[in-house]
Amino acid sequence: LFYNAWDIDFNYRKKPKKVLKEISHICFMDGPKVIRRNIYKYKKTKIVMDTILTENSNLIEFSLDIEFYEKFKMLRTEFNPNFFSDEVTCEIQFGVIKRSTLDNDPISKAQFEICAHKFVDVSNENYGLALLNDSKYGHHVKNGIISLNLLRSPIYPDKTADRGRHHIRYALYPHINNFENSDVTQTAILFNNEPILVSKRLSFESIIKSDTPNIVIDTMKKAENSNGVIVRLYESIGKTCKAKIKTSFKYNNTYEVDLLENIIKPIKIDELDFSPFEIKTLLFEL
């Protein structure tokens, strides 16, 4: 793979590849988790991979600790599910985009490597399979294969790119229903925001929440130029809907604002209308 940081060879899948062999494994339990730990080695590279099943969870999690010392090599994980679809749903910022999994025209052929944020999902009307990731964005979803790019080793512009130690997480999430009627988005958000464990018992109400599953509350911050709170939320699956927002804090007035926090109009948060993938920014005046 004699390509540097921003390029991948169109024909890279035709080049020789090495399936890493397991050199040892153990199985053990850790609280509610059942873990199989596999150890792989390739030249100077070492991979310790935990495959994790957790009680009351539908995720198959993978946690990798890697010492990677390669040059012009790419490390990928691949899955070959027993069903597939002609489209893959890819999460992007503030929504999703559907791409072809076929190679029947120049555009779909050019999508031999695609980007996605927290997940890719292949589904039919009855069920689907999502590959969730934590900060790994390069995917190949073609011809029955779901592949995630874990590491590369280019030499330009950084001669030591990707060399060294890495901790990587990803997960498979089988679900019922098609993507639009699943909880893939919510599950991916939770996977990317692990709970913080503390040695105390805590109980508190959510600061802000929506009554509509496909409305994602993405950002909450102090207003720049007024005594207020800014909340940014969006419709996540491409459907027109209505939503009601509830807060646990007191406020005086609510406004829809632009990205510079200039007031557009006053609004009522118990009757918000969203068009597909619409982003709204709200000002709660304190």
Image (cartoon, grey):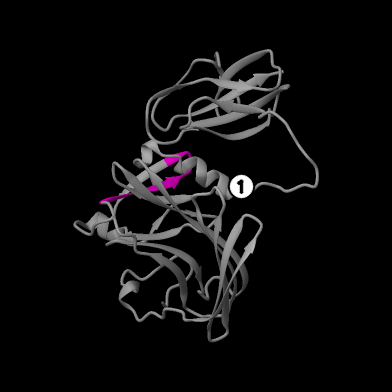
Q: Which residue does the image show at 61% across and 26% down from the upper left?
A: 261
Q: Relative to 136, does residue 152 appear above or below in the rendering?
A: below
Q: Quadrant of the N terminus?
A: bottom left
Amino acid type, label 1? Asn
Q: Answer whether residue 30 is visible to the viewer in this image.
A: yes
Q: For the view shown, which residue lies furthest in the left direction? A: 104
Q: Relative to 252, does residue 242 appear above or below in the rendering?
A: below
x, y (%) of residue 96? Answer: 40, 42
Q: Relative to 44, does residue 200 appear above or below in the rendering?
A: above
- By secondary structure, the bulk of the magenta-drawn segment is best described as strand
Q: Nearer the viewer, residue 144 or 37?
A: 37
Q: Which residue does the image show at 48% across and 31% down from the upper left?
A: 213
Q: Nearer the viewer, residue 200 or 116?
A: 200
Q: Quadrant of the C terminus?
A: top right
x, y (%) of residue 198? Answer: 77, 47
Q: Label 1: which residue?
A: 193
